[in-house]
Amino acid sequence: MSVKASAYIKLGTALRYLIDAREGELLGGKHLLANCRSVKDLIEELGFRATRSQEVFAHFDHQYIHLTKLNDGGETRISEEDAGRLSRVSRRIRDALLAEATTIEVFPKAPSLPQKITLSYLWTHVDLKVWLTLLAILGGIFTLGVRLGSEPAVLNLLGFS
């Protein structure tokens, strides 16, 4: 699975926004509900299966549905009680993600090089374009040597006159 690091950053940012939820913040627009949706989507997209299957995720989903029903599409603001609930469940989601994240390798380790680099190793691991480029350079050097080798000035310089 190939995932951009920005997805992890977005997940952390959205989760932090929800943890910091306070009474009176807007539900709609790019506020609380949008961040809830981002957290849900990114947990799915990034493959946090263990977090997704935990009871805490069901509580988070329940809170999201509850807040969605409260939102009238206008300037609906979150109550102190709902903000507290959202903050607590978001903290629990963060803890579950942190526990699960210890099992995820985001940046795979590069393969180690052998003790000796042989032609066989290079033939197997170097791209064909590199080999063709190398052959073209060697061919160019050989051709240049043949041409310059027949020049009188070069023959004089080498003492073959």
Image (cartoon, rainbow, N blue to C red):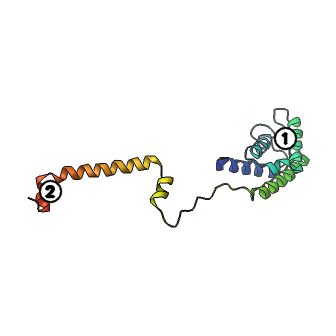
Residue labelled with disc 1? 77
The residue drawn where x is 78% and y is 54% is 97
Q: 10 Å neighbourhood of mark 2: few (<14), some, or many (≥20)? A: few
Give coordinates of residue 104: x percent, y percent.
72, 55
Residue type, mark 2 in image: Val
Residue farthest bottom in this picture: 115
Q: Amino acid at mark 1?
A: Arg
Q: Going by the image, does 135 lie left or right of 58? A: left
Q: In the picture provided, is 124 more to the left or to the right than 65?
A: left
- Which label belongs to residue 154? 2
Which percent across, then down, holds residue 68?
Answer: 85, 37
Quarter of the image where the C terminus is located: bottom left
Front residue (pair 154, 3): 154
Say what secondary structure mark 2 lies in: helix
Q: In the current view of this chain or complex, which residue is farthest to the right?
A: 81
The image quadrant that residue 40 belongs to is top right
Task: Tell me which corner region of the image, top left, top right, bottom left or bottom right, holds residue 28.
Answer: top right
Residue at 74% over, 39% down: 30
